[in-house]
Image (cartoon, rainbow, N blue to C red):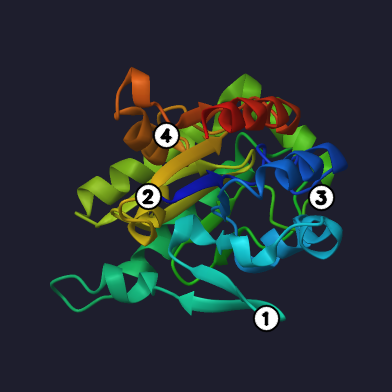
Amino acid sequence: MNKTIVLFDMDGTLTPCREKIKSPVIAALRKLNPHTRIGIVSGSDYDYITQQCAALFDFGGIDLDNIDILPCNGTKFYKWDKTSFKLTHDNDMRMALGKDSDGASQYQKLVRRITTLQNEAVLGVLKDTTLTGTFLQYRGSLLNWCFVGRDADTSVREEFEKINHQQKVRVLYKNKLDKFLKDESMLATSALGGKTSIDIYPHGWDKTFALQYYPGWNVYFVGDACQEGGNDWHIYQALKDLGRNFDRSYWTKSPEDTVNIIDQVMERL
């Protein structure tokens, strides 16, 4: 019998963005867990996943031997080892990008450009917006650019979301960044992450990276950023391309919708 895993995005899928997982989602995953392996594949790093999903891991009644944690689009892999999740696979974005013809670090050039664009946004479209800190967060295999800062609370994030809805800030600056990546022949890709960020990573290090761990498996995926340019788009399309009768991609609207999708997946297992 083929092995099966259901991969879930985290923010907007299992949890509200940057908030903790809630009991209805835990209950749905508890029902699903005996029937299939479960993976959490997120652009976030391990610490965010364990913070937001602590109730699932600590009190959720879940078989942790049957859970995989795949931070940074799956470029990191954590597996349960008796008492804790252990890192078994990692990657280095700076090494992957390498150096250009004059010996300069491509990663350093990327950071300098994003810093310039962040400053432009702060003095322009975000001049009246609340800002916190940590606008750039290096996660080893992924760089996260958060316009209002990783330390933003829910109210600051909601304030940014309103401005972004009106002025399409993220799309505007993603396009500017993509032009830079193309002009510099840089082997990196950008994607909209969460509600306030852009993720940047080497070509091919999108969430389809996670599929290499499961050759020959039946893999399902549930995510909320499945639009083109979203950080779930590549894996959503990869599994959708299996054909209408074999679709294993689900585009959720919210954690509440994810609960309904889990019921649909269980009917197919």
Q: Could you say which disc has been placed on residue 20 in the image?
A: 3
For label 1, count other residues whose C-alpha is less than 10 Å away and answer few (under 14), some (14-19) or many (20+): few
Judge depth for marks 1 and 3 and give the one in front.
1
Asked if disc 4 and disc 2 are in contact, CB closer than 8 Å, the reply is no
Q: Residue at x 62, y 58 (%)?
A: 135
**Sequence-wise first label, 2 or 3:** 3
Tag 2 secondary structure: loop
Q: Position of residue 19 (x, y in %)?
A: 80, 47
Judge depth for marks 2 and 3 and give the one in front.
2
The residue indicated by pointer 2 is 217
The residue indicated by pointer 1 is 82
Tag 4 secondary structure: helix
| Residue 83, quarter of picture | bottom right
Task: Give the CA separation, mark 2 to mark 3.
Answer: 30 Å
Q: Could you say which disc has been placed on residue 253 in the image?
A: none
Asked if disc 1 and disc 4 are in contact, CB closer than 8 Å, the reply is no
Q: Could you say which disc has been placed on residue 236 in the image?
A: 4
